[in-house]
Amino acid sequence: LTLLGLESSCDDTAAAIVRQQDGAPAEILSSVVFGQTELHSAFGGVVPEIAARAHAEKLDTCVRDALSEANLTLDDLDAIAVTAGPGLIGGVMSGVMCAKGIAAAKGLPLVGVNHLAGHALTPRLTDDIAYPYLMLLVSGGHCQYLIARGPEAFSRLGGTIDDAPGEAFDKTARLLGLPQPGGPSVQKEAEHGDPARFRFPRPLLDRPDCNLSFSGLKTALMRMRDQIVTEKTGLTRQDRADLCAGFQAAIVDTLVQKTRRALTLYLDEAPAIPTLAVAGGVAANTEIRAGLVALCAELETDFLAPPLNLCTDNAAMIAYAGLERFRTGARDGMDLVARPRWPLDQTSPALIGSGK
Ligand code: ATP
Ligand code: FE
């Protein structure tokens, strides 16, 4: 089976081609990502209208590039997979319209994909792992624990009740005058900082569930920063590094402790080879990774982190998730709708009102 995947739910326009023969590992024949970072940089965040227009403009080129990189034409495809949500609605609509156009013109089946399912299935694209596995999705927009039981069967164990960790990293960088994206710059500063000098809060750790909260970190950071600034005239390089190190330590601690809880729940199901997989841009953080690797070693669980370019937004994960759905016989019609919100686990009470 050979599928073209399209992704346009946030600020990356992407197209990719994934192929899988029966019983063989999946192959990424091409993966094209056109980032919009420069278009939005002056506004301090993604501007939905600008994003939607840029997607509409770039999708055709991305599809053409994905095909030519894979040395294929539209006639070689078995189906088209497209992100149908959740995300910025204008962008999702651009992708869905483009996919419908190709499907209609070529008489190809259409498969709508949940963007989060794309992230959550990435470990199966890159490695031969069996269901059920535990997934920690940590990105700029999401933070949740899922047990993946099938291409459309996920149980959500918990997640952030406010900010996502990536958002917290980005806000911290902004408050300290460090470059965006905040994750890498905060991590770099933290390398020569003292994590013990500032004690950041670790909310919800006293609760037995798998929910997390990160919005208090920025309030704490502002308070600490303002106190230093009033005592002295400004922040020194060392102050900044110590603040970053303290902030990062709080995130690592929180994630590791909540992951311990999620793993305990998951291990109750006793799969033959238990696996914790991570996805999302924040999974690139070296300290977070080290904490999770140590935890998994202790709990005799495999740790799997797909390569970074597949952890962040891309269309290969959408093509692959579409392929898994397609295999189960799933098809969507021309009435496929773009959804701004689309929880992976429709049954989870924790989701009501959160939209994520
Ligand atoms: P989503 O895909 O959930 O809608 P997104 O597209 O914003 O969100 P990603 O592209 O997966 O998220 O990841 C980007 C986020 O990852 C940014 O917030 C960035 O700061 C963060 N990030 C990247 N590298 C690191 C790092 N080394 N440490 C911490 N955070 C990082
Ligand atoms: Fe994403």
Image (cartoon, rainbow, N blue to C red):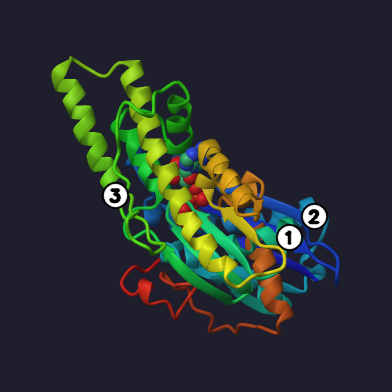
Horizontal and vertical percent position of residue 237: 35, 17
Which of pointers 1 and 3 lies earlier in the amino acid sequence? 1
Q: In which quarter of the image is residue 189?
A: top left
Asked if marks 1 and 3 touch (Cβ < 8 Å), the reply is: no
The N terminus lies in which quarter of the figure?
A: bottom right
Mark drawn on residue 17:
1
- Pointer 2: residues within 10 angstroms few (<14), some, or many (20+)? some
Which residue does the image show at 41% across and 37% down from the upper left? 249
Q: Which amino acid does label 3 sit on?
A: Ser
Which residue does the image show at 72% across and 74% down from the upper left? 79
Label 2, on which residue? Answer: 70
Of residues 199 and 184, the one nearer the viewer is 199
- Pointer 1: residues within 10 angstroms few (<14), some, or many (20+)? many
From the viewer's perspective, is the residue at label 1 or at label 3 nearer? 3
Horizontal and vertical percent position of residue 157: 46, 68
Which of pointers 3 and 2 lies earlier in the amino acid sequence? 2
Q: Residue furthest left?
A: 230
- Residue 105 lies, with reference to residue 134, above or below; the image says below
Horizontal and vertical percent position of residue 320: 69, 65
Label 3, on which residue? Answer: 215
Which residue does the image show at 51% across and 67% down from the upper left? 265
Which of pointers 1 and 2 lies earlier in the amino acid sequence? 1
The local secondary structure at tag 3 comes to: helix
Q: Is residue 53 visible?
A: no
Q: Can residue 258 be seen in this view?
A: yes
Horizontal and vertical percent position of residue 217: 29, 43
The local secondary structure at tag 1 comes to: strand
Q: What residue type is labelled 1?
A: Ile
Q: How far apart are marks 1 and 2 (CA)?
A: 7 Å
- Pointer 3: residues within 10 angstroms few (<14), some, or many (20+)? some
Q: How far apart are marks 3 and 2 (CA)?
A: 43 Å
